[in-house]
Image (cartoon, helix red, strand yellow):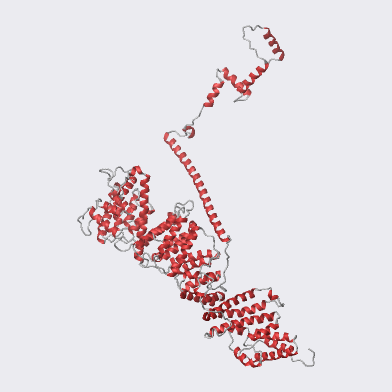
Amino acid sequence: MADWNTLLQQSADLVGQDFNNVPRVERNLPQLQQYADALRSRTNRYRGPSEQAAATRLLAQQGLDAGRLTSEVMALEIVPTIEDVFHAETNNVEEYLQQVEEATLLAAIQEAQQESMAAFDAFMDQCITRDWNANKQRLFSLIAPSGLPGGPQPLIGRSAAGNGGQGFATAGPRLSPKEAAYVEIAKDMAVAAGSRSGAQAGMDFVKRFKEACEKYDEKPLAQDLPISTIWGLVVRVLNEARRRNVTPASPGRYVDALVAGARKHLEEEFQHHVRTTITRHKMQAERGADPDPLREVQAFIQVKFRDRGPLDFAAPNGMDTSWVQLFYCLRAGYDRAAARVSERCGDLLLLPTGSRASGMGMGANLRQMVDEWLRNNCRLSERHAASLSREVERLLRDKNGLRSSLRAPYQALVCALLVGDVRAVDALSAGLQSAGLPAILSTIDDYMWARLALVGGGSGVAAGVGGSATLPQPGLPVPIYTIAELQTDINRFPPQYYSKQNREPLAYVMVLLVSLQWATAVRFLWRDDTTKPYRLDAVHMGLALFAEGALAALSGAGTGAAGAAGPEAMDMASLALQYSRKFVTAGDAATALYYRWLAAIARGGTLAIKGAMLRELLVGERDFGTLLGGGGAGARGALHALVADTEERRQLFESVAQECQMSAQPEEAVELFLAADRPVQALIIINNEMSAAIMAAVNEAPMELGALSGNTTSSMGRMERIARSGRAAVERVTGERYREPLPSSSAVIAGDPAARREVEAFHQLGVIREILMAAKGGRYDQVLQRLPELPFIPTERSRLAECVRITTQLHPAIAERLQDVVAAVADAIAARGKVVGREAANQLANELNVLTSYANSMSGTRLPQAVYRKISEAQVFVTPRNPFTPS
């Protein structure tokens, strides 16, 4: 690079030259600076100053425009080719295509794995959310406060007039609208069961449950079937028995009616499927406005076999579909259309049994068979079944015909259904599968419909359990396919097979119901982990089906005998008991009673079973007023709605009371005897309990004078409760005859010595209670004041013999407290002898002498030594004083 001097010399030389031939441009320095900045900003837009300047000079030397080149590069779009994505590492096209296919499959598998993981995560989130909401609702229902007073309501002190029959509502759990509706229906069902209101009432309750479910149904997440469809299925199946006027009292006919009802349900569902398919493919179906069901079946066939070319009903010389039409008419339940189509079905040899000549071979004969089959509940006569069975054998042996013809498999299937031969149906299915042909009974609904059509359709001996795929033997009778064998075939596969790997548990329930395994379906809804949202429906569905009598009839399905109170009924009772604990925990004893009543009826409904249920609820809940009422057997407690007959209710109360008495449950026994209008029996228990309660209260009572007015112990509280019960019982005894409470008047009950004895004993126990409590508190003057109220304690010499006689006949409850009374009187006399004057001391001495003679005169009743010791000590303080001794 040149130095500064050289550049200066060059500049001087240039200045000296002549530039007249060069145009001059006048620019000042600010303008030159502005132009330089603009040029610099334009050249520095995409590159740095030095790099962009160097690139521009290089391009200019090669004759390229830098701005044009920049715009073209920016507009350039690079499109990758398949070679860029899939590198060709092979030598021929086949290997290259195989490599591309493997890479595509790998990418598809990876994408499917990602989608599966995302779907699984979403499903788990839904399950967690659902379970959390359910647990939260269950927790809130248990701990949520209620505005109504909880706890047991005592029966004592309530009268029949004070209980209007509806005043026994107690606080209960917080129920959803659906559960509240179910509970009300269950209450009506328990009332109807208790009143024995007809055998058909169960069907009405099933319909009410269905209506309530449809009104408040909430379909769980990620499931297609709502529970209302299950209720609808049960109603439709039972409607067939109602239509035929068949009751569970005839189990054989009743089961046949249920089988027909299940088959009709599947036919109605298939009709809906046919219409949906036609609607989805209107162009191919060409349905038109003809209301004929046969035209509907033809439209469905035209859609189903649209790839088979023209069909006979759509074009002349089309493919024969007469047997296909006949099958789908039968499958959809279009009986009249099936009869019409059967006239056009030919290709039947129909050799009579024992003959080598051909029979009719015309559609007229088949029309007769179809009519007979439809009229006789899917059964043919033995003669027709035998001739058609040979035709089935011929069709099944013609393997080439099954492969080449569209109608041949349907012809064989229809003939097998008419015969009722399950072996032929299984052999046809196996033959189609081995030949690689599509199955006709491809869905579980089709399979179940065909099996139900085969049930009872045979004309010979019963088959073994399950069907076989062997060909029927000519000349042998067609075996009868029973409902028990159908259930065995269904149960060969686990529930996951029918419920889409537990994604649709109600689908398995529908299979169980259609196969008449109703008790199994209810148990599955109650116990399986995948059916937690349907526990409520399981309980009430089982109770409704038991009330209908369907479970009892189906328990003998296949044997022709109905079970009375078999394991199915015991399971329903167990469900009702478990569900009732929810209301027991929440303090709603009245609602729990209804479910326990239904459980008792399911277990046999005897008086002993009902009594055991009532006793268990009374002992656990102790809500006597709500359950029993407050006015005897005629009061309107919760049990009044279940047992309307007063005498029956009294017998129930007495039976339960005796059980409670034998099981050392005196308080429950007292309440039950009072509710049964047996106050004397209640008073017997009260007197015995009060005798023991008095002594326990006296032992726990404080000894300070006046301390009893403010302090109350647990024994004293129990004694007060027993005393209230005793007063109520005495009022019942006395008021039963004279309609006015006179508990102290023995004349009112003079005609009943036992009642008089118990009333007097209760009154005397009350006096003894006051005496002993006063002695414990140091109020000895009160002891001596109340002493004359006890007729068996003498205070005068003249009454000594009479008191000794009365003592020998004392009530056992009074006799237990005799020694305590004598000891308390001795203590009172001794205490008063210390503080009274001479005259009073002489009177006390006389009373003590009479008491001593009384204690020594009792024959057969030996008082403890402590009592005699107290009497001896008292004599020290009440010895007659010298008149000259100052007092």
Measured as percent of width and height from the top left, residue 769 is found at 64, 80
Query: With respect to residue 844, does 715 lie above or below?
Result: above
Query: With respect to residue 157, does 847 lie above or below?
Result: below
Q: Which of 701 and 832 is in front in this view?
A: 832
Question: Outermost residue, left direction?
Answer: 357
Measured as percent of width and height from the top left, residue 242 is found at 36, 62
Measured as percent of width and height from the top left, residue 71 is found at 54, 24
In the rendered image, which quarter is residue 419 located in?
bottom left
Q: In this view, does 303 lie to the left or right of 741?
A: left
Q: Is residue 494 left or right of residue 775?
A: left
In the rendered image, which quarter is residue 387 located in?
bottom left
Measured as percent of width and height from the top left, residue 185 is found at 46, 63
Quarter that holds the C terminus: bottom right
Q: How many marks?
A: 0
Q: Nearer the viewer, residue 148 or 236?
A: 148
Quarter that holds the N terminus: top right
Is residue 538 visible to us here? Answer: yes
Q: Is residue 631 left or right of residue 408?
A: right
Is residue 482 visible to us here? Answer: no
Q: Which of 806 and 51 is in front in this view?
A: 806
Q: Is residue 331 left or right of residue 823?
A: left
Query: With respect to residue 47, does 612 lie above or below?
Result: below
